[in-house]
Structure formats: structure tokens, C-alpha cells
């Protein structure tokens, strides 16, 4: 049976060139499905990559108990000072704790591409923030001077939003701000933000002596539980502490689920059309080789080799379509930068589409499934073709 399968399959594959037009229909249909599938899901992969870049395991985020985002959290100045004195926090050479009480607000500012208003995160920080967020560095202009109405913008924010260049004067809240620098943070979500002095931001938005979070750098990798226990057992506090990777990993779950659901629905709907295209293509291929199949059957070839040969041809066309669609998606979308709404923080997050190897392999597998489904019915028809009826066409 193996030798028969190889012989029949070889005949089928050699005849593809004579049926290039109908075969191209199946290839193009499957390539289109793979292209859309990869393009949509690369959004989720890009958002996920941005969040992973934000997760420094040596940094802890402290929020009010029951809060799942900084937007819904709130901490008083006294609480922030108690948190800063907790054990397990790293200290600098002078003995000062490496912590940064921070305030997070959202300002309206237009996007470059559409000009439509967007929610841009404006974060108030302390001087210690640049020791806690140790990967952050100024790449253009200079760092902000505390006590002044100055801001610095993340590199991604500067590319996505209007007029975020060094020297620009902007008005938000009850204050006018001067943008003095652009910073890089290794592709993290912080690059979608604007930073300023928290003590200037508080009166601008009438927040008094309040914060929304405290970022703290751990003394060592084993200090997290010590810090968490000290904070949660303190009767003066009602807070929760989590490592930065856990926090940022949870921040886009809703967005990623929406994208993957939409991508799955689109892929299924388009996939049905691609399967029908493959069915028509393979029926045409079987019809054009009716006499060949009948002759082989009359010579003693079994039905199983015929079925396998048709499925192999359909699978080959599907794999070619998957490779073409995946290659186009990678060339067109990988690294493309844009911004979207993070539904958990109600602010824009800038990210790059990420066409990963895992995503391409998943798309290729999906293409193969479509090819097999498209070739199944024609393969069965070819195997059941009456030999006598087919030979009458000779």
C-alpha cells in the first residue's frame, strides 16, 4: 500500500502545474485567512510583549486593598510613609528607602494618525522613581527638574501623540507644562506615559496629599514575602502588594481576551470560505483525473492510496497558502507600532505588533486543518468512483 500511495501521490503532484489556476484559488484563499488571523492575533502578542517588558521581578507595587488598577486605588500621605518604612525594601547608600509614591491621572491629547482625542497617562513621580525604575533613561533632552511644571514623555508616547517633542508647552488640569525630555524604558508600558513631579501634579488636579500607588525595589529576591506580611499585618494599612510582573500581566487580560476572541471568530468565518474554496479546487482536480484514477483502480490500486494522495495534495496547497500568508503578515505587521485603549486603566497603551514564531506555527497548523477538511470529501469521492463508469470516459 505504501508503494501505491507514493506512486499515486507523485502522479497527483506532477499534475498540479496543469491545474495552476484552480490550485491558486485554494492557495490564495488560505493565505488570506492566515494573513488576517496572524495580523489580528499579533496585536495581542504585541500587547503581551509590552507588559512582559514592564515586569521587573525585583519591583513591588502596593495598592489599596481591593484595587486591581492604579486608577481605582488611593493612598494617603501617611500611609505612603508607613509603606516606605516597611522591612524588605532596598535602601541607597544614604539609607533612604528605594520607594516611589506615585499619582496616576489621565489627560486628553490627540493621536497623530487620526487626530482623535485619546486618554494619555500622566504619572506623578518622586526623585526616587528613577532608582526604582532603574531601566529608564533619557534619550532626548534632559530629565525633569522637581518643583517645576515640567514633564518627560516616553518614547512610544512621543511617536503616537501630537506635539510631544522637546520644548513643547502643553496645558492640562490647572497647570501649563513644558516637555523637557524623552525617555526609554526598554519597551515597557511606561513608554506610553508622561512623567512629572508628583508634588506639582497633586495641586494641579486637587488631589491633596494623596497617591495611588507606591513602587518599591526589594532588598533581595527573598524579601517579597517579608514585605507583604509586614504591610498586610499592619493595622494602620489596608493594602495589597504584588510583584510588578504579576500586576502588569493582569492589566491587559480583558484587552487580550477581546482581541483573541475577535481574531478567532474572524478566522473561523474566513476559514469556512477557504475550506469551500479548497473543496472546489480538489473536486476539480479529481474530475480532471477521473480516467487516471479509474485506470489505476483497474490495475489493482486500492482506494486508500487514492484518498491519501488527494489529501496530500490538499495539504500541500494549504501549507503553501499558510507560508505565503504568514510571510506577508510578518513583512507587513511585525514591529508596526500603534496605540489602543487599555480597558482596565482607561488609558492608551502604545505597543508594536508582534508576529512571533509560535503564532506563525499556530497559523500554519490552522492552514493545514483547512486543507485537510477541504480535501476530505473530494478524496472520498475519488475513492468511491466506480471503475466501470470512469473507464467509459476513455
Image (spheres, rainbow, N blue to C red):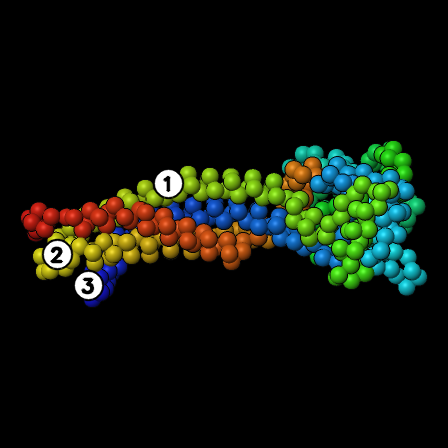
| Residue at 32 percent of width and 50 percent of height | 372
Label number found at residue 1:
3
Residue at left offset 53%, top offset 51%: 332
Can you tell which mark lies on residue 297?
2
Between disc 3 and disc 1, the foreground one is 3
Asked if labels 1 and 3 touch by Cβ distance under 8 angstroms, the answer is no
The front one of 151 and 372 is 372
Task: Give how far across and how far down residue 130 sits, in percent.
Answer: 83, 55
**Residue at 19% of width from left, 50% of height from top?**
382
| Picture coordinates of residue 97, whole percent (x, y) | 88, 56
Q: Residues within 10 Å of mark 1 (few under 14, many from 20)?
A: some
Q: Earlier in the sequence, mark 3 or mark 2?
A: 3
Determine which residue is flagged by label 1.
272
What residue lies at 77% left-to-right and 51% top-to-bottom? 228
Q: Where is residue 312 shown, x and y percent of the image?
A: 29, 57
Quadrant location of the N terminus in the rendered image: bottom left
Q: Is residue 383 left or right of residue 87?
A: left
Q: Which is nearer the N-term, disc 3 or disc 1?
A: 3
Q: Is residue 71 visible?
A: no
Q: Is residue 125 left or right of residue 279?
A: right
Amino acid at each position: 500500500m505504501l508503494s501505491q500511495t507514493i506512486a499515486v501521490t507523485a502522479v497527483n503532484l506532477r499534475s498540479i502545474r496543469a491545474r495552476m489556476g484552480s490550485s491558486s484559488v485554494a492557495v490564495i484563499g488560505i493565505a488570506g485567512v492566515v494573513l488576517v488571523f496572524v495580523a489580528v492575533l499579533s496585536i495581542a502578542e504585541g500587547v503581551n510583549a509590552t507588559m512582559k517588558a514592564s515586569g521587573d521581578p525585583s519591583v513591588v507595587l502596593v495598592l489599596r486593598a481591593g484595587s486591581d488598577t492604579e486608577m481605582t486605588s488611593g493612598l494617603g500621605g501617611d500611609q505612603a510613609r508607613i509603606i516606605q518604612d516597611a522591612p524588605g525594601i532596598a535602601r541607597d547608600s544614604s539609607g533612604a528607602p528605594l520607594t516611589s509614591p506615585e499619582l496616576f491621572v489621565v489627560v486628553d491629547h490627540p493621536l497623530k494618525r487620526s487626530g482623535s482625542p485619546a486618554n494619555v497617562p500622566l504619572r506623578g513621580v518622586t526623585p526616587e522613581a528613577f532608582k526604582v525604575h532603574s531601566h529608564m533613561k533619557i534619550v532626548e533632552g534632559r530629565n525633569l527638574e522637581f518643583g517645576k511644571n515640567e514633564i518627560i514623555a516616553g518614547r512610544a508616547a512621543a511617536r503616537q501623540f501630537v506635539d510631544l517633542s522637546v520644548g513643547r508647552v502643553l496645558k492640562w488640569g490647572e497647570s501649563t507644562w513644558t516637555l523637557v525630555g524623552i525617555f526609554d524604558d526598554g519597551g515597557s508600558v511606561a513608554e506610553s506615559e508622561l512623567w512629572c513631579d508628583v508634588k506639582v501634579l497633586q495641586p494641579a488636579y486637587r488631589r491633596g496629599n494623596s497617591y495611588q500607588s507606591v513602587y518599591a525595589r526589594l532588598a533581595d529576591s527573598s524579601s517579597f514575602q517579608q514585605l507583604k506580611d509586614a504591610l498586610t499585618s499592619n493595622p494602620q494599612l489596608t493594602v495589597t502588594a504584588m510583584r510588578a510582573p504579576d500586576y502588569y500581566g493582569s492589566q491587559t487580560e480583558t484587552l487580550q481576551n477581546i482581541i483573541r476572541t475577535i481574531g478567532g471568530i474572524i478566522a473561523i468565518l474566513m476559514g469556512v470560505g477557504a475550506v469551500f474554496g479548497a473543496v472546489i479546487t480538489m473536486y476539480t482536480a479529481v474530475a480532471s483525473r477521473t480516467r487516471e484514477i479509474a485506470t489505476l483502480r483497474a490495475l489493482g490500486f486500492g482506494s486508500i492510496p487514492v484518498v491519501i494522495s488527494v489529501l496530500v495534495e490538499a495539504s500541500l496547497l494549504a501549507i503553501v497558502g499558510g507560508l505565503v500568508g504568514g510571510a506577508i503578515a510578518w513583512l507587513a505587521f511585525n514591529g508596526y507600532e500603534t496605540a489602543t485603549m487599555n480597558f482596565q486603566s482607561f488609558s492608551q497603551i502604545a505597543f508594536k505588533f508582534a508576529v512571533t514564531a509560535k503564532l506563525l506555527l499556530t497559523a500554519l497548523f490552522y492552514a493545514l486543518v483547512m486543507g485537510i477538511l477541504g480535501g476530505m470529501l473530494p478524496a472520498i469521492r475519488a475513492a468511491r468512483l466506480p471503475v466501470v463508469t470512469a473507464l467509459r470516459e476513455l
